[in-house]
Amino acid sequence: MKIGFHTDAFNSACWSFDDCLQWARHHDLQYIECGLTDGVSWIHGLGYFPHVALYEDPVLLRRKMERYGVRFSQVDAAFPLSTEEGPLRGVPYVLKAVAWAAQAGCPCVDTTDGLHPPAGLTVKETLTMMKRSYLQILKVAEAHRIVVNIEPHGWFTTQPDLLQEMLTFTDSPYLRFNMDTGNTYIAGQDPVSFLKKFLSRVAHVHLKDVSSSLAERMRGRATGVAISHCSLGKGVNAENIVGCISLLHEAGYRGVLSIECEAAGGPLLEESLLWLRATLERLGIAETR
């Protein structure tokens, strides 16, 4: 399997995306994931933001990344599509992200739903709204041959039956699943059992551990973790992460395992990387490039 990381690890450190590329090269990582912003931001312009703006030329950025020996595994365009603003704000944002990703050499774009069901709409009405949105998105995704992943992060996507309905909005091979070990756990699900239900649809994976204190406060009362302050292997979700990796390996998954945790300027992400590489070695799984 391949190993990568999400640049949100360096949000609190106020790193630039270039800093993240340097970190990846220093730690012999070839895959990186970041968020996309649509518009101008002062903190991004000053170099204190580890994500990428859609106004940045994707081809020039791809060439810069090639000089670091790094490529995108996915870009994050996860504006909640189940919300009232989903069709108005989220759909144009994801459409731009898809076309941008194609030029940047990025194979996947991540999407999700909101933390709560929208007021004034039934579950059926919201699913109908999201289906319309995803069908619009998939037209463009198919044209550009970009995979659109659905990540479990909100009220709909962390419920297996509802996620199953979302993943069957269309039979397009470009609508796939981004597994997240931390979000499924904090939502009260068993990550291994959750993954089993959608194993054939997995195109990208987020590995996220959960501290015991966060689990005690929020498990079953939240649907996602904004950023985990627990390195891989140090939390209550470590055994589930190992189980998910084993299950993915048995199923022939050869894609990216993207680490998601607060880096604390680097050390926690380094701990996660060491743990993940040791775990893959213990399981007899080769790290591929």
Image: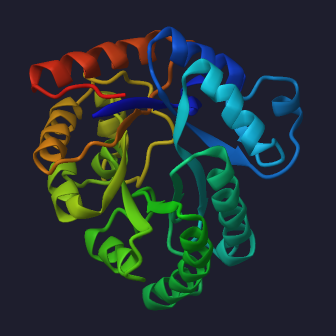
Q: Quadrant of the C terminus?
A: top left
Corner quadrant of residue 282: top left
- In this view, the residue in front, 113 or 236, is 113
- What x and y, as percent, mark residue 47? 81, 23
Describe residue 183's horizontal placement relative to residue 66 as left or right: left
Up/down of 3 relative to 137, above or below: above
- What x and y, as percent, mark residue 256? 36, 39
Describe residue 70's horizontal placement relative to residue 88 as left or right: left
Which residue is drawn at the image coordinates 16% and 28% (left, top)? Answer: 285
Which residue is drawn at the image coordinates 51% and 51% (left, top)? Answer: 107
Corner quadrant of residue 234: top left
Which residue is drawn at the image coordinates 61% and 80% (left, top)? Answer: 136
Q: Quadrant of the N terminus?
A: top left
Describe residue 69's horizontal placement relative to residue 222 as left or right: right
For residue 229, say whether it is visible.
yes
- What x and y, as percent, mark residue 30? 47, 26
- What x and y, as percent, mark residue 98? 63, 60
Which residue is drawn at the image coordinates 59% and 38% (left, top)? Answer: 34
Colour scheme in use: rainbow
Describe residue 196's horizontal placement relative to residue 47 as left or right: left
How many marks the image carries: the answer is 0
Corner quadrant of residue 166: bottom left
For residue 82, say whether it is visible.
no
Up/down of 145 relative to 66, above or below: below
- In this view, the residue in front, 200 or 80, is 200
Up/down of 63 relative to 172, above or below: above
Up/down of 53 relative to 19, above or below: below
